[in-house]
Structure formats: C-alpha cells, structure tokens
Amino acid sequence: MEELRPGLWTWTAEHPEWTPELEWGPEVRCYAIRAGATTVLVDPVAPAPEADAILLTVPWHRRSADELGLPVLDTPPPGIEARPGFFAEERAYWVPEHRALVLGDAWMDGNVAPTEWATDDPEAPARLRALLELPFELVLPTHGEVADRAAFEASLG
C-alpha cells in the first residue's frame, strides 16, 4: 500500500479472473480514498484496506467486491464526483481535495483505450477530452502507473 497523499492510497494485485488470453496484464491498480468520514475503495482487489464502501469505474471491475462484503455505491459520497468516462457505462471519479482523477478502462498503461473498444459510440473520445476541464494533477488509472495531467493530455493527441 502506497500513500499518494494524506487520505489517498493505492495498491496493486493480480486480477482474480485474469488469464493469459486477455489483452491486459495480470496486475491491476486499486485505490482507497478518504472522503470526509467515509473511506471508499475503487475497483478493489483483495487484500484491501478497511473501508466503508466500494465504487466501480465500470460494472465489470467488480474484482474482489463480493469477497470484501462492502456495499457497492451507485453514487459517490460527498467529496468525490462521478463524471462520464470513455465507455457509456464508465464513470471517472474526480476527487477535488486531492486534485485527482480516477479512470477505469478509459486509460490503460498510459494510453487512451482504442476507439474500436467503444464499438459504435463516436462520443467516447469527446467524453475523455471533457475531463480536461477539471483542474486535476494526478491521473489514477486502474491499469498501469499513477501519472500526471501532462501524460494524460499527451495521450489524447
């Protein structure tokens, strides 16, 4: 577990359902965010720190959510804002206190998801560009290393 900022932590673990046929590596990244009196885990893999609830960036990132036995929130607690992500069912989480943006499959290993992954959704790239309106400094991907705003901007081309 690495503390990125007071009240913001990250850890990596092997995805519980990973197989070699998948297009992404076995190691995934997870986050714990203290928002007021509530600590939430984002896309967690066990073992995970103690928390009150879980947020998912995409529905298929349940990972260890069921095993952890915490409620999966539809709405983030105060201090965390949900924004549209690359995929229609994806949510990016803006954490103003930490000037951080949590991304699911929209940004993997420092690259924007291929447009063909969005199938027939021509608005997918525009949803990512819209995130640039936020004054974030940290980019917190669930696949890959924590990065900064400049790296995210550069990946958008």
Image (spheres, grey):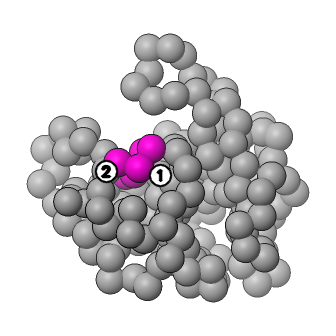
Residue neighbourhood size for the residue with mark 2, other residues' Cα within 10 Å, grouped as few (<14), some (14–19), many (≥20): some
Between discs 1 and 2, the one toward the N terminus:
1
Residue 104 is marked as 1
- Please identify, in this view, whether the residue under mark 1 or under mark 2 is nearer the observer: 2
Image spot of residue 115 (x, y percent): 19, 45
Q: Is residue 122 magenta?
A: no
Quick one: 118 or 20, which is closer to the camera? 20
Q: Amino acid at mark 2?
A: Val
| Residue at the disc numbered 2 | 112
Q: Quick one: which residue is furthest to the top in this view?
A: 20
**Residue drawn at x 78%, y 69% as measured from the top left:** 39
Image spot of residue 6 (x, y percent): 78, 76
Image spot of residue 22 (x, y percent): 44, 21
Check whether the beta carbons of the residues at disc 1 and disc 2 lie within 8 A of each other: no
**Could you say whether the residue bearing mark 1 is in a helix, strand or loop?**
strand
Q: Is residue 144 above or below residue 52?
A: above
Main secondary structure of the magenta stretch: strand
Q: Amino acid at mark 1?
A: Gly
Residue extent of the magenta highlight? 105-111
